[in-house]
Amino acid sequence: MGVWHGDLHKKKSSGGRKRAYRVKRRFERGSFPVETTLGEPKRKIARGRGGNVKVKVLRDKYACVTDPKGGKTEKVEIVRVVKNPANVDYNRRGVMTKGAVIETSLGLARVTSRPGQNGVINAVLIGEEKIG
């Protein structure tokens, strides 16, 4: 069972219903979003269209944090998820997506990668005043 990206269910511009002229196809299949949380590192490898491989981060406790002033990147431990503006529920549950603010040993950082799709958590240090 998965998310479906076919368009056989849509209506015609006149408002009438479209009659399905074929069954659902495998290439129209989608997948549920991966909700990356803080914990012991765990990744899932998914096969994509054309045999491409997508690494999905299910849990991780490390992030590659870049200091924009010095241009230096370090692998540091994530202390907690401070805020996730993408979704109120993600904010409450501490799910990391692109744009989430995390607390690290270097300070607060904003996630710039898509952990559920890129297979890595990259972040950039931000100032304390930029949270709100």
Image (spheres, grey):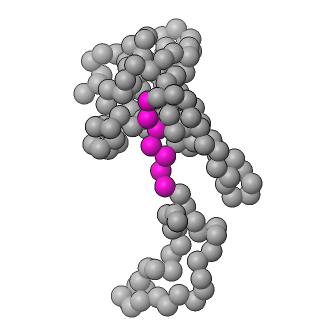
Total numbered labels placed on residues in the image? 0
Name the residue nearer the viewer: 58 or 104.
58
Q: Position of residue 75 (x, y in %)?
A: 56, 16
Q: Would you say 14 lies left or right of 28 here?
A: left
- Determine which quarter of the picture holds residue 45: top right
Q: Position of residue 33 (x, y in %)?
A: 47, 50
Q: Is residue 124 above or below residue 106?
A: below
Name the residue nearer the viewer: 61 or 91.
61
Q: Is residue 126 in view?
A: no
Q: Position of residue 2 (x, y in %)?
A: 52, 63
Q: Would you say 8 lies left or right of 99 here?
A: right
Question: Which residue does the image show at 41% across and 89% down from the upper left?
Answer: 17
Question: Which residue does the image show at 64% across and 70% down from the upper left?
Answer: 26
Question: Which residue does the image show at 48% across and 17% down from the upper left?
Answer: 77
Q: Main secondary structure of the magenta part?
A: loop
Query: Does the segment drawn in magenta span residue 36?
Result: yes
- Determine which quarter of the picture holds residue 28: bottom right
Q: Is residue 18 above or below residue 94?
A: below
Q: Position of residue 25 (x, y in %)?
A: 62, 74
Query: Does the segment drawn in magenta span residue 16?
Result: no
Q: Is residue 105 in view?
A: yes
Q: Which residues lie in the magenta part?
A: 32-38
Question: Which residue does the image show at 57% across and 65% down from the upper left?
Answer: 29
